Image (tube, rainbow, N blue to C red):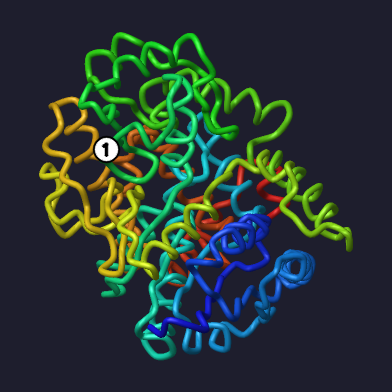
């Protein structure tokens, strides 16, 4: 790529996260001299694109830098000759997430954005779209890097590498960033005095921490997690881990491990919200409505504090740092979803893992973590294979494979209800599942209907 006039295309430009993305680019302009940013969305997202796009322009106008911000519904126009492409879209918008959550919960099983039945259906909807984007990139910007933080980020990145045959990609998540922002203060130190090593999968990783003197302080952080604010993401119910379990593994699990280590309590909380204040997606819809009202203010030219309530704080900042690290060959330590290449020997070297890596012009160079103990190894291998089956089902539209994925997902109780949940989700998302068109037609002929009233109204 050239060393001037950087073009960045953001797919899902109408996202409420876009102001944070702009803030990150403005903060790094000296090492990442952007000339143009293209925010692209679909017709259904046009109003939000115009609102957040106008704010993005105000943010750059308030900066000392001359950057052109373009708004478009034409993806090809945005991708043409781009140096970097970021993806932050949601197929079916937030209403689709409401269905992902409510339909499983109506049967007493976990409905969540990236975990359980809902997470698998988000993958079914998203993977065909990301593969179409990759095909466009092969034609229009074959040298560009793809920086993905569309969820489920690990499965989406795996699909890009495995089926899109595109290696210039990294998946990002805010969860490791949040841990590295919160934990140093628990030790009364700063991040530059600590060495972090992450290993696992997106929303299913563990990490260890060492001081720059060589002293392992993982157990010290674990101890403080039970007496201080551990920085749990706002979208995850705060039920504590079992301390003895964490002490035994001598690793810190990510916040999403609560869905597996404390499944009973997490499910009870989700069902309670389902029956009272509404699921997380319904709550997020309210937060987003408030954010976009703020974004309409013609005087607002900076990221509002309320964005932190959205649940994905630091996503966009991580993307900006990754892009800057590639462009300037910084070799920065960043936690990314990338090809394993032996970093986690318990998994195939060609599969995608979420690990610590040094990021520079050559991409992500994963840091070897080594084999995990039997408990964590078993979890990891089961989860990775569940992901691989889910991805293959998304690409092929094979109903039997989808049922296999449901059967082996730890948050789905296999049986008749699991099949009913899956069939209802197919009907609910029929407009966004072209690969499963034959299956959906058959289910409709069989009279499958949606049990949950709210999900039915949105279908």
Q: Secondary structure at mark 1?
A: strand
Which quarter of the rendered picture does the C terminus lie within?
bottom right
Q: Is residue 376 left or right of residue 149?
A: left
Q: For mark 1, does the 10 Å Cα neighbourhood hold few (<14), some (14 to 19), or many (20 or more) residues?
A: some
Which one is nearer the viewer's eye here, 152 or 84?
84
* Residue 447, quarter of picture: bottom right
Residue 66 position in % (x across, y down): 67, 78
Q: Is residue 348 left or right of residue 153?
A: left
Task: Give the left or right position of residue 256, taking residue 213 as reference.
Answer: right
Can residue 125 be seen by looking at this rendering? Answer: yes
Looking at the picture, does residue 50 appear above or below residue 457? below
Residue 270 drawn above or below residue 320: above
Q: Quadrant of the N terminus?
A: bottom left
The answer to whether residue 311 is left or right of residue 169 is right
For image coordinates 39% across by 41% down, the residue present is 203
Could you tell me residue 153's position as x and y percent?
Answer: 41, 54
Work out whether residue 416 or residue 169 is closer to the camera in this orientation and state it.
Answer: 169
Pick whichever, 151 or 63, lies toward us. Answer: 63
Which of the 4 image quadrants contains residue 220?
top left
Residue at left 77%, top 44%? 286
- Residue drawn at x 36%, y 45% as measured from the top left: 202
The residue depicted at 24 percent of the width and 20 percent of the height is 250
């Amino acid at each position: 790529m050239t060393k001037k006039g950087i073009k960045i295309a953001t797919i899902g430009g109408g996202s409420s996260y876009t102001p944070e993305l702009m803030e990150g680019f403005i903060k790094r302009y000296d090492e990442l001299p952007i000339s143009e940013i293209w925010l692209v969305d679909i017709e259904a997202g046009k109003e939000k694109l115009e609102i957040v796009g106008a704010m993005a322009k105000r943010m750059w106008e308030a900066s000392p830098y001359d950057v052109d911000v373009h708004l478009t519904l034409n993806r090809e126009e945005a991708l043409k000759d781009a140096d970097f492409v970021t993806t932050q879209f949601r197929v079916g918008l937030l209403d689709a997430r409401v269905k992902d959550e409510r339909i499983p919960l109506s049967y007493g099983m976990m409905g969540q954005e990236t975990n359980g039945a809902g997470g698998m259906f988000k993958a079914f909807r998203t993977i065909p779209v990301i593969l179409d984007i990759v095909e466009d990139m092969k034609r229009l910007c074959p040298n560009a890097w793809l920086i993905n933080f569309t969820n489920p980020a690990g499965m989406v990145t795996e699909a890009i590498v495995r089926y899109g045959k595109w290696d210039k990609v990294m998946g990002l998540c805010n969860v490791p960033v949040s841990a590295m922002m919160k934990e140093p203060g628990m030790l009364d130190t700063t991040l530059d005095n600590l060495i972090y090593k992450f290993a696992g999968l997106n929303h299913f990783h563990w990490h260890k921490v060492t001081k720059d003197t060589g002293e392992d302080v993982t157990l010290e952080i674990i101890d403080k997690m039970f007496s201080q604010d551990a920085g749990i993401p706002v979208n995850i119910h705060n039920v504590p881990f079992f301390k003895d379990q964490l002490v035994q593994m001598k690793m810190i699990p990510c916040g999403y491990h609560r869905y597996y280590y404390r499944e009973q309590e997490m499910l009870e909380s989700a069902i309670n919200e389902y029956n009272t204040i509404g699921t997380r997606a319904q709550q997020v819809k309210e937060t987003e409505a408030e954010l976009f009202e703020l974004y309409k203010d013609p005087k607002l030219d900076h990221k509002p504090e309320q964005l932190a309530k959205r649940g994905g704080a630091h996503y966009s900042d991580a993307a900006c740092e990754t892009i800057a690290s590639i462009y300037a060959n910084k070799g920065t330590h960043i936690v990314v979803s990338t090809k394993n290449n032996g970093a986690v020997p318990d998994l195939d070297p060609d599969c995608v893992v979420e690990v610590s890596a040094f990021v520079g012009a050559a991409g992500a160079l994963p840091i070897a973590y080594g084999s995990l103990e039997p408990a964590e190894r078993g979890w990891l291998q089961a989860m990775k294979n569940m992901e691989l089956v889910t991805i293959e089902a998304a690409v092929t539209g094979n109903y039997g494979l989808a049922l296999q994925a449901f059967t082996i997902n730890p948050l789905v109780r296999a049986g008749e209800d699991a099949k009913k949940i899956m069939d209802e989700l197919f009907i609910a998302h029929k407009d966004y599942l072209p690969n499963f068109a034959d299956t959906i037609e058959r289910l409709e002929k069989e009279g499958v209907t949606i049990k949950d009233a709210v999900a039915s109204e949105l279908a």
